[in-house]
Amino acid sequence: MAAPSMAAALAASLPAPSATPATPQPKYEAIPASMAKVIDIEAEIPLTNVQLDGMVVSKIIKHAREAPSTTAHGLLLGLDLDGTLEVSNSFPLPYHAHDDDEKSAKTIARHQAAMLRSLKEVQADDSVVGFYQATTLGAFFNQTLVDTQAIHQEKLRHGGVVIVHDISQTARGNASFRAYRLTAAFMDAYKKSNFNTASLINHRLTFSSILEEVPLKIRTNPLLSSFLGTLTKSIPSPVADAGPNEAYEAAVGPSYSALDLGTGGVTRNLEQIVEAVDAYRAEDGNVSYLIRQIARERAKADNYIAKRKEENQARIAQGLAPLPEEDVSRLFKIPAEPSRLESLLLLGQIDAYAKSLGDTARHESGKNVRGESERRDLI
Amino acid sequence: MVLFRPSFTCITTLAVVPYSRIPQSVTIHPVALFTILDHYLRRTDQQDRVIGTLLGRRTDNGVEIRSAFAVLHSETDEQVAVDMEYHRTMYELHHKVNAKEVIVGWYSTGSNLNTYSALIQNFYSLETAPHPAVHITLNTGLVEGEEAGVKAYVSSPVGVTPKAENCVFVPVPVELRLHDAERSGFDLLVDASKSSSSTTAQPVPDLEVLETAIQNVSSMLDRVLAYVQSVLRGETKGDPAIGRYLMDTLGTSVGVGEEVGGFSGSLQDTLMVSYLASLVRSQAEVSARLALTTGSSS
């Protein structure tokens, strides 16, 4: 499917032979037939999955760990090939908490441009394919993420992806990375910046249909694989009476953080659910206040029209000229219907917190059952 | 910028130089290693080795290398050049994001130290002054007969009148340091590298991770049990050291009777939490759906 369009594109890029017959044709490296199917110049092959390089995994984890709370975000660099988006590099973006928006946006743009230029000089990939965002307890829905991704989806080839990294799950011993894109329905509503009830119904938007997940794979290149193999290989220690920790020398020993019985995270998770629910209630209050106000204004306007009509009928009956029916919208200001986006995102957050709480609970109960049986064995 | 035209060769010895500020140990995080490997993969055909700057923090008696970035350089028989401007720009970019990380030294791939290494080391010493610069050599293990590995060095001047192109590289112990979060990422990569396609699908369910960990422990217990039984049968000669360690380990385990009801009690709690979580989720779902229906009826 890509072949004809590619041929057309190649033909377009070549100078027309009839116009300059004398000058030698510039030589273009032909794309081998085996690759013709997988290279698409026009970005026509849709993305089906994302492949994350080992280095990017460690870079994101490092940044997420060092940055305060969930402020860590950065850009992903890479290429797409035959429907697979290969993310091969990333770099963190500076975080400005208190600067005014315009200034910080400019600094970030400058930073980004300088970094891309520098990376290109050392043969690294320099095309932006998306961004990453650190999160805790799975709740990554927020206005900034949606805004950034919406801009990316407009501007980047293939729309780009956002990779979400969950710090709290990683601390529990299971590093988690997920790739998302905004759904077409949401993008449509976003472009019209219309999130009132009718638009939500038209687009069938609930919090679960804002983002669609793209399958993500982690890949280690052969060099990294072999190096990891060397690091994890255990060699008997040359020291004769070494302790069990040193008896086998591997640069990295086995890890058991998954078996930690501590349940400290649950309390925090519950607190966050409560906070999110509170925020939702507040937002809900705002929305219903606005809706009540709309209803009040509309009732006033309707009353006015009805009264005017009655008056006109009376005047016609008396043989007088009817009064003009004025434009009510000028007399009564009916506020616009409130945007439901904020409450939608908050609901998504509540759902994500609850989901992560449920996962934790399942995990804990698994450990508890195991611990119970171990204890019985000991007795 | 061209650093120097060499005329001497460098000496590598194991001499310990009494120098107060010399770091006693070097710890390195996986990010830095992976960045170096990636840089090596992306080198041009003309490059035998690649170099770059190491960023990190200084502790009381050691250096912690937390990240790295590639730097352009060229080496010929006659001269070596390092793009200092590039190095400065990249450092400033990194510094903006993480102000705590400073230049601590430089890396190169391959394990030979030559005159050029001494010259580059001299350049980086100026960058890190007054602290000494650390040099990391990472052998990628691609050359036949050479083991992949990481070595760290600090330099000290040699000769009566020290010259930039002469120095002694003193080895310093180097250690791979992993934080808990980095650890789980590292495990993920190890899993990926072990699978035949060198990829793993994400996300891995928590329970699967737990299962692997439990299987791991269980297989280790089996190994210990097999060893103890073979000692009891008299097939293997018991090692008193191992015996003592086993004794210690069993002594630290949960005391019998101490945790009675503990596990089942906390099991009840977690089941409750699990129930609550699904309740909240269904409420959220219902709320989102209701928002869609109220409009259509009006």
Image (cartoon, coloured by chain):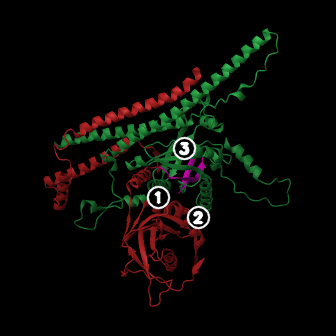
Chain colours: A green, B red
- Label for residue A51? none
- Label for residue A122? 2
Residue type, numbered disc 3: Asn
Residue reaching furthest to the top: A317
The majority secondary structure of the magenta stretch comes to: strand
From which residue to which does the magenta span run? A70-91
Mark 3 is surrounded, within 10 Å at the Cα level, by few (under 14), some (14 to 19) or many (20 or more) other residues, namely some
Foreground: A201 or A171? A201
Inter-mark Cα distance, 1 to 3:
22 Å
- Which element is circle 3 on? strand
What quarter of the picture does the C terminus of chain A occupy? top left
Q: Residue at x 70, y 19 (%)?
A: A305
Task: Choose the circle earlier in sequence order: 3 or 2.
Answer: 3
- Which element is circle 1 on? helix
Residue type, numbered disc 1: Leu
- Residue to which mark 1 is pinned: A224
Q: Which residue is drawn at 33% across and 57% down?
A: A253
Residue reaching furthest to the bottom: B160
Residue type, numbered disc 2: Val
Residue B153 in the image: x percent, y percent? 42, 74
Q: Is residue B4 left or right of residue B142?
A: right
Foreground: B274 or A215? B274
Does the stretch in magenta take in A84? Answer: yes
Mark 1 is surrounded, within 10 Å at the Cα level, by few (under 14), some (14 to 19) or many (20 or more) other residues, namely many
What quarter of the picture does the N terminus of chain A occupy? top right
For the residues beneath circles 1 and 2, the answer to whether they share a chain is yes
**Residues marked 3 and 2 touching at CB (< 8 Å):** no
Marks counted in the figure total 3
- Residue to which mark 3 is pinned: A49
Foreground: B57 or A97? A97
